Image (cartoon, rainbow, N blue to C red):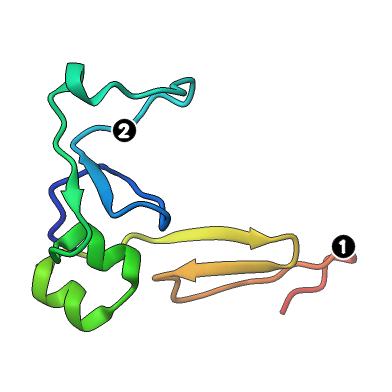
Amino acid sequence: MLNANFKSILYTPELNYYLVLNHLLDSDMQTLDITKKGLILQDRNIKSCPLTLLENDLTEIQTYCGYSVVDSPVPKAVYRLTADLILLSNITQLTIKFENNDTL
């Protein structure tokens, strides 16, 4: 599990600064007044965990964020990814039943 102690990153490649938030933003919010919220701009020239996540550099993510091994069972689950693609998680047996009641 990634060691990240934040919930949101406000970032655009056009600026040299970004914001890290400990909460998720309201989807209706259009303007964020950083003087009223007590937020501090982060410099993109100084490496940090949120910045390395945005840059997608695995070596730096491990260095600046780190991770912890979670020793717990993987839950059983089935996820529909697309109309014709599913992901099985920790499923040991699968039976497929067709419309004509045949099984596979």
Instruction: Report which quarter residue 71 is drawn in.
Output: bottom left
**Badge 2 amino acid:** Leu
The answer to the question of whether label 2 and label 1 lie on touching residues, with beta carbons closer than 8 A, is: no
Q: Of label 2 and label 1, which has the lower sequence position? A: 2
> Horizontal placement of 50 versus 77: left or right?
left
Closer-to-camera residue (33/24): 33
Disc 1 target residue: 99
State left or right for residue 55 relative to residue 98. left
Secondary structure beneath dot 2 equals loop
Vertically, is 11 above or below 62? above
Tell me how far mark 2 sits from mark 1, CA to CA: 44 Å
**Residue at x 29% of width, y 21% of height:** 33
> 104 or 87, which is in the foreground?
87
> Considering only vertical position in the picture, is 21 above or below 95?
above
Q: Counting other residues with Cα less than 10 Å from the Cα at mark 2, is it few (<14), some (14-19), or many (20 or more)?
A: few
Query: In the rendering, at what x and y percent does residue 17 appear?
Result: 26, 50
Residue holding disc 2? 24
Q: Where is residue 4 in the image (x, y as percent from the top left)?
A: 16, 55
Quadrant location, the C terminus = bottom right
Identity of the amino acid at label 1? Glu
State which quadrant residue 77 falls in: bottom left
Q: How crowded is mark 1: few (under 14 residues within 10 Å), some or many (20 or more)?
A: few
